[in-house]
Image: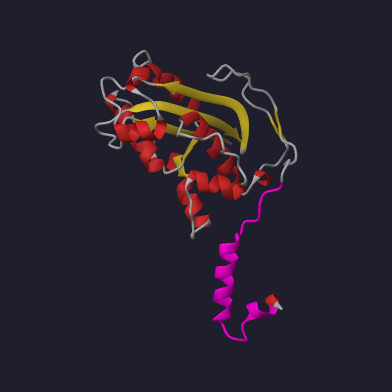
Amino acid sequence: MREIIFDTETTGLDPNADRVIEIGAIELVNRFASGRSFHVYINPDGREVHPEALAVHGISNAQLLDKPKFAAIVDDFLAFVGDGKLIAHNAGFDMGFINAELGRLGQPPFAPDRVIDSLALARRRHPMGPNSLDALCKRYGVDNSHRTKHGALLDSELLAEVYIELAGGRQAALGLTVEVDPRPSRGGGAAGPATIGPRPVPLPPRLDAEAEAAHARMVAKLGDGALWKRYLQ
């Protein structure tokens, strides 16, 4: 099973007027990182980066002048995705931009059934939130201390770790090694068998003090005959 964790950075918020300026993607095979990745900066074809967007990702117009346009990288991106499922955090945003870029080139959009929104998964699993990428990294013990600004490849790497936990943890895979595509990644790294060892640091408890206190308040209102009372004795 191939899944592609990906993220985009853009010139703004409107897929009809703004453009994709960065794509980062990580390949998972049976919920393990295969070692293959895709990363590219993209010339926005005359669109200016909005100041609000610049504050988020730090990618300036000057940095993009010598970068390829979307038409020049689309075949590489589609080849990397292949038949894999696409996973993104708040996927509607990223897919809106990707499909708009494809549409400008006369390419068909990705079908909705090929896309998984990790934000929707997080909201179902943790309905009390928060469910931002940073909050989920904290919940699952994923080190994001080096994330000072948004970046498509870095955010994809962090999301890959978070998504594995959202999908049931590494136990979801049937083995500790996977055979991966021997082709090198676009970033130049060679892929090989991925070996997963034990966690160096156990995951933190899923319940924090605030959640435990809220539960205690709820139980206190149930009355002396409530089953929960027996577990608190």
- Report the span colored magenta: 202-230
Q: In which quarter of the image is residue 65?
A: top left
- Up-down relation of residue 104 to residue 131 (above or below): above
Residue farthest to the top, as pictured: 66
Q: In which quarter of the image is residue 98?
A: top left
Residue 33 at x, y percent in the picture: 61, 32
Q: Is 57 part of what is drawn in magenta?
A: no
Q: Is 227 part of what is drawn in magenta?
A: yes
Residue at the spot x=52%, y=57% of the render? 126
Residue at the spot x=29%, y=34% of the render? 15
From the viewer's side, name the closer residue of 118 and 48. 48
- Up-down relation of residue 125 to residue 56 (above or below): below
Residue farthest to the bottom, as pictured: 224
From the viewer's side, name the closer residue of 68 and 66. 66
Residue 5 seen in this snapshot: no
Residue 158 at x, y percent in the picture: 55, 37
Residue at the spot x=41%, y=41% of the render? 91
